[in-house]
Amino acid sequence: MPLNKEQKEFLLKIAKMSVESAVRGTWGTPPQTDDPDLIEKRGAFVTLKKNGELRGCIGYVIPIKPLYITVWEVAKEAALGDPRFPPVTEEELPLLTYEVSALSPLYKVSSLDEIKIGRDGLLMKKGLYSGLLLPQVPVEEGWNLTEFLAYTCLKAGLSPDCYKDPLVEIYRFEAEVFSDEET
């Protein structure tokens, strides 16, 4: 079920509140909601950008918490815990833009024909190794399916052709992606 404008605005608002309060050392609990779509357990990612460049991105793939709680928690981690970047500073806060990706359940891929660029994100998994790319990544990068598969393998720490290995599990998922630049 797609989220409406008010629900998207609420999730973007709590993502921003979470980041700002975490960076300032006052992080606590999110505003409460009883909206059934927002309290449904769903995976989600929060992506932070500064001047159009990635500044942090963290999420939960598995739906373990209500959507709004997931957004609250992963927004903080995107700002302070993404190992690819130093923690966001207070001076950077006015320069950040926020993007939320609310995820569908994972679907195991039995044929590569099931994967559609622009609709699906991918999760590659082999043993302890796993890597994920959101649906918007191949579109932003201009990748074809083979490149998307290869980069997802690399993100998992595996060889770029790992998707051909029968021991590798491939999952696809959809995401409803929205940002504060759109609302």
Image: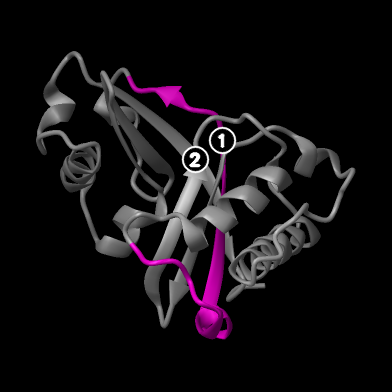
Residue 33 locus on image (x, y percent): 87, 48
Going by the image, does 19 lie left or right of 135?
right
Q: Which mark is residue 66?
A: none
The residue shown at (43%, 45%) is: 119
Asked if the magenta segment contains residue 166, the reply would be: no
| Magenta-tinted stretch | 85-109
Q: Amino acid at mark 2?
A: Glu
Secondary structure beneath dot 1 equals: loop
Residue 83, compared with residue 48, is above or below; it is above
Q: Is residue 177 visible?
A: no
Q: Is residue 15 visible?
A: yes
Q: Amino acid at mark 1?
A: Ser
Residue 182, compared with residue 148, is above or below; it is below
- Please report whichever mark, 1 or 2, sits nearer to the chain's N-terminal start: 1
Disc 2: CA contacts within 10 A as few (<14), some (14-19) or many (>=20): many
Residue 36 locus on image (x, y percent): 84, 38
Going by the image, does 16 lie left or right of 78?
right
The residue shown at (63%, 35%) is: 42
The residue shown at (24%, 36%) is: 156
Residue 168, compared with residue 160, is above or below; it is above
Disc 1 versus disc 2: distance between alpha carbons?
Answer: 5 Å
Which image quadrant: the C terminus? bottom right
Q: Which residue is mark 2?
A: 174
Secondary structure beneath dot 2 equals: strand
Q: Closer to the camera, 155 or 37?
A: 155
* Identity of the residue furthest to the right in this view: 34
Q: Which residue is mark 1?
A: 104
The residue shown at (52%, 84%) is: 95
> Residue 53 lies in what quarter of the image?
bottom left
Mark 1 touches mark 2? (CB < 8 Å): yes
